[in-house]
Amino acid sequence: MTRGDRYEILGFSHKLYPLIGGHLMSILSTSPLSPTFEEADFGKGSPTFSTLLAPLEAQLSYLTPLESGSNRPLEYTFEYQVRGLVYYHIETYTSALDLLQAAESDDFVNRLVVPETGLGQSTFYETNATRGSLQMTELLDRLFKKAAKQVDIDYVALGDLVAIDGSLIAACLSMTWADYRASSRKAKMHLGFDLNRGLPRKMLLTQGKGAERPFVSFLLEAEETGVIDRGYQDHRRFDDWIKEQKHFVARLKKNTQWEVLQHLPFSKGTAIFFFAKVLLGDQAHQMTHPVYLVGFKSRGKVYFVVTDRDDLTAEEIAFIFSLRWQIETFFAWWKKHLKVYHLISRNEHGVLIQLMAGLITYLLLVLYFHQRYGEAPSLKRLRNLRWDIRHETQGSTHLHIYLIIHIDTHNSSRYCSYGSIAMQFSNRKLLDSIDKKAPS
């Protein structure tokens, strides 16, 4: 826009409100948000979202109370915080500003996010940056246990299997805590994923270049089997895990040395070509406990996988390692369809809060889809869920279409374009089609 440009909206000359995120913002957008309904009414706009959120609501009274650091009671409570973050992931917003804009224009979102006393943007950002991590951790654990009781259990004969892996999260250079390389910043999420049930269960957050191996003991319980890739190989830690009665099935690096103690039988004519009881490492770095090593080929690659468990056949060891790819599949689906890596905070605590809220959202989807369809989360079901919520809440949001006439006083030309002041609408495809059809 230049000084020579003039805008006419609906035929009346008018000063143009600030253009943010592709939407015309209200001039009141920089003021604290005001509530439009009482908190108790938050679920009335969408029975679907209320049903989705019900398992979460049932756990809130069991969490450690979030206390104020001053004499004043908290106004933006943990309940508002977690509801807003779950809705953020369900609707796949790409910034916190998107959510706050929706809370200004959409009565349903306002009920979820804004307390009776109102909500300033600084309060929203400060809350996520400083508090709620303990409550999020407790809530994640309680929802995991609830989901674990309801979904089917696979591979029971193979024991409790937990895939452990890390995922890098792109960060901006100002996020100095997310140390990775001199020219880039990244954080790393460390996740424990229940392979028997297909559920995320525990997570940690570190700087991008942080080591992964130290966190296995936190993510793995006694008598469980951690399924890990070669980045977790550490012979000293292997011995420590065995002492802690924490089992592992781990891929080895190519340069690993071992001493064969006993060759073991395996089925011929399969992908497996080696099975033996061994001591890992050279003489200077040798394990004190013997382990079981399997060599097999898959899709043209050679794998050597080791375990401390003596109750498994070579075929079972190879199969258990193949299940590790479930955590890769989860990461890809979760990041793509819930947009959890669109960060709303540059603060380490804020990133942690958002990631845990993203896992909580996934567990709520697991419970909802299992109860309604007897299925695991899928893109098809997620799209239907979003449509149901938008359809149920469309009455609380009005779609205003404005004809904006742009007059270029320098070139004596004029053209029309269409815009919308609505921040949220149940049928976003309609909004997209309106924007795309607007003349340029």
Image (cartoon, grey):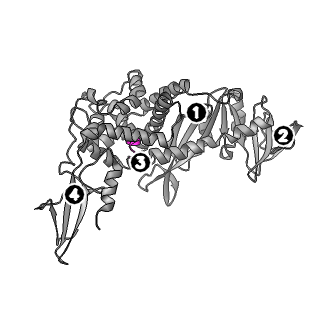
Q: Is residue 378 above or below residue 64?
A: below
- Apparent side of residue 140 relative to residue 322 in the rendered image (left or right): left
**Residue 300, quarter of picture:** bottom right
Residue 63 visible in the displayed image? no
What label sits on residue 18 in the rendered view? 4
SS state under label 2: strand
Badge 1 marks a residue whose secondary structure is: helix
Of mark 2 and mark 4, the one earlier in the sequence is: 4
Front position among marks 1 and 2? 2
Q: Residues within 10 Å of mark 4 (few under 14, many from 20)?
A: few
The type of residue carrying mark 4 is Pro
- Magenta range is 88-92
Q: Residue 223, relative to residue 361: is it above or below?
A: above
Q: CA distance from mark 2 to mark 3?
A: 46 Å
Which of the two discs, 3 and 1, labels the residue nearer the N terminus? 1
Residue positioned most to the bottom: 411
Give the class, few, some or many, for how many residues have Cα within 10 Å of label 2's Cα (few <14, many ≥20). many
**Principal secondary structure, stretch drawn in magenta:** helix
Residue 402 versus residue 269 in the image, above or below: below
Residue 420: mark in rendering: none
Q: Residue furthest top?
A: 62
Q: Which residue is mark 1?
A: 218
Q: Which residue is mark 2?
A: 275
Label 2–label 3 contact, CB within 8 A = no
Residue 187 drawn in magenta: no
Q: Residue at x 26, y 31 (%)?
A: 75
